[in-house]
Image: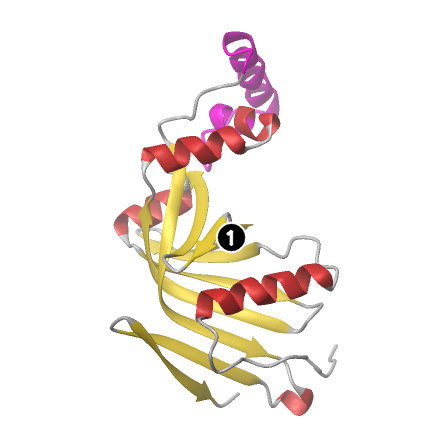
Amino acid sequence: MRSDYAGSGSVPENRTPWRLLEDWISAAHDAGSEEPEAMCLATSGPEGPSARFLLLRGLDAAGLRFYTNYESRKGRDLESEARCEACFWWPETQRQVRVAGRASRLSAETSDSYFLSRPMGSRWSAAASRQSREIESRHVLLEEVARLQREFPQGPPRPAGWGGYLLAPERWEFWIGRPGRLHERHVFVKAGSAWRRTLLAP
């Protein structure tokens, strides 16, 4: 199955990469994307490469923020190899963004603050789940949630093994689908305190 592309918009000359990502997420939301902040995070560790989708939970000049279990596959990968890459794709606007850099843990205070802002159900699941580890059955997981609900009726504290990461970008690529596969690829590479911008062939 094939379809031609007719992506809209451009990459302004005076826009910083992280502001441009904000703009494109907003445009995807306006175009009807159900999860415009969903991104595929690719890591590499002792078990080889691995990729999965998660949600962007913060964005500014310092980089991209996301949260997970430190003992999950992605957490273990990032402990052994900090370099990683996030990729966004919005079919509604026919745009893609890739962000490559190094991830480091956020402070405990930042992770605490975000954890307390989550819906209660998400807090229970984070406290109960030994993410990426084998479990005997789903029933065992639900029993652990029930046990924590009895122990912490006002909500569980943030687990010590759960928290946030900052992906500090070293390279950005903004892709716009164009007719005839003549897509636009705008790359920003870190150059001191500035970003060096180039255009790649599709």
Place of residue 100 in the rendered image (x, y in percent of width and height, measured from the top left): 39, 65
Q: Secondary structure at mark 1?
A: strand
Place of residue 107 in the rendered image (x, y in percent of width and height, measured from the top left): 32, 38
User: For the residue marked with disc 1, what is the amino acid?
Assistant: Arg
Is residue 134 shown to the viewer in this render? no
Judging depth in this view, the residue of 76 and 115 nearest the camera is 115
- Residue at 60 percent across and 90 percent down: it is 182
Determine whether, in the image, residue 44 is placed left or right of residue 199.
Answer: left
Q: Which segment did they paint magenta?
A: 125-154
- Residue at 67 percent across and 63 percent down: it is 28
> Based on the displayed image, in which of its 4 quarters is residue 64 positioned?
bottom left
Rendered position, 58 above or below 83: above
Residue at far top of view:
150
Judging depth in this view, the residue of 101 and 134 nearest the camera is 101
Judging depth in this view, the residue of 29 and 45 nearest the camera is 29
Q: How is the image coloured?
A: secondary structure
> Based on the displayed image, in which of its 4 quarters is residue 190 positioned?
bottom left
Is residue 92 shown to the viewer in this render? yes
Main secondary structure along the magenta-highlighted residues = helix
Determine whether, in the image, residue 105 is placed left or right of residue 125.
Answer: left
> Based on the displayed image, in which of its 4 quarters is residue 181 positioned?
bottom right
Q: Which residue has dot 1 on it?
A: 52
Rendered position, 61 above or below 20: above
